[in-house]
Amino acid sequence: MKFTPLNDRLHNYLLSVTLREHPLLKELRHETANHARGNMQIAPEQGQLMALLIQLIGAKKTLEVGVFTGYSSLSVALSLPEDGKVIACDVSEEYTSIARRYWEKAEVAHKIDLHIAPAIQTLDRLLAEGQANTFDFAFIDADKENYDGYYERSLQLVRKGGLIAIDNVLWSGRVIDPEFQDADTLAIRALNEKLHQDQRISLSLLPVSDGLTLALKC
């Protein structure tokens, strides 16, 4: 067998023996579950994996493209040292107002620099300011049509040995269904194929939640 399928019972077991969720992360997750777009929230085991990766690479300066209500940024900020920093990009004051509330409650707001603007603009400004090769970690989880642009800019911004994590790369299975030819699905397919051939990175696509690609800058 190539993999063990996760039914609800086995997934619940997985969580019961691995998840060490900060109380405020749990509170945020439950609040977001009742949000009209709550399906956009990452899974708790994914947040915990990202926190572990932050610790593994000794990250201090990180980038987030797509904040929503803040579960991923809170997971990362809690794992960063006191002088660590998250540069967070989003376009929604409404969604990120929830994130800000939890950053404050967790006493990590000083670690997070939120930019409300199209992420491409923010990333281009960071590059123009000379911040290429200064980030340790980047997480991409925003509008799918711009994934390639986010990836290319993140690849410039992270240092050699820095890590880029890209969410939703399995796209609920639509990536292998030829009936889906919408712009988002086409963009994810194209990026997956591009990354497979990209010699600038070391690559692994993990079947975590909706698919998580890890790209290590060579």
Image (cartoon, rainbow, N blue to C red):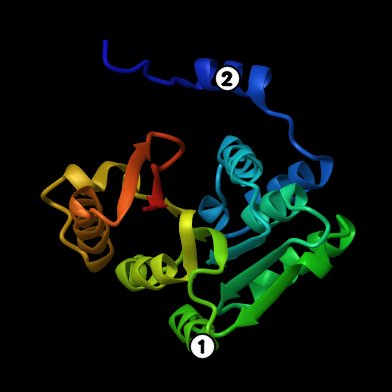
Q: Helix, strand or loop at disc 2?
A: helix
Q: Amino acid at mark 2?
A: Leu
Say few, some or many: other residues with alpha carbon within 10 Å of mark 2 (under 14 / 14 to 19 / 20 or more): few
1 or 2: mark nearer the eye: 1
**Which part of the image, by quadrant, shows the N terminus?**
top left
Q: Residue furthest left?
A: 178
Which dot marks residue 125? 1
Asked if residue 108 is positioned above or below residue 120 in the image, the reply reads above
Task: Kindly indicate the quadrant of the structure image that contains residue 23.
Answer: top right
Q: Which residue shows up at 41% across the image and 49% down it?
A: 216
Q: Find out whether the residues at labels 1 and 2 contact each other: C-beta distance under 8 Å.
A: no
Q: Position of residue 154 (x, y in %)?
A: 44, 68
Along the line of sight, which residue is nearer the eye, 100 or 39?
100
Q: Position of residue 209 (x, y in %)?
A: 46, 38
Q: Is residue 152 left or right of residue 126?
A: left
Q: Is residue 8 left or right of residue 68?
A: left
Asked if residue 82 is positioned above or below residue 117 in the image, the reply reads above
Along the line of sight, which residue is nearer the eye, 27 or 203?
203
Asked if residue 196 is positioned above or below residue 200 in the image, the reply reads above
Task: Kindly indicate the quadrant of the structure image that contains residue 105.
Answer: bottom right
Q: Which residue shows up at 30% across the image and 68% down it?
A: 148
Q: Amino acid at mark 1?
A: Arg
Q: Which residue shows up at 77% across the image and 65% down it?
A: 111
Q: Which residue shows up at 27% across the image and 41% down it?
A: 173
Residue 141 visible in the snapshot: no
Earlier along the polypeptide chain: callout 1 or callout 2?
Answer: 2
Q: Helix, strand or loop at disc 1?
A: helix
Residue 208 visible in the snapshot: yes
Which dot marks residue 14? 2
Alpha-carbon distance for marks 1 and 2?
Answer: 41 Å
Q: Position of residue 133 (x, y in %)?
A: 49, 69
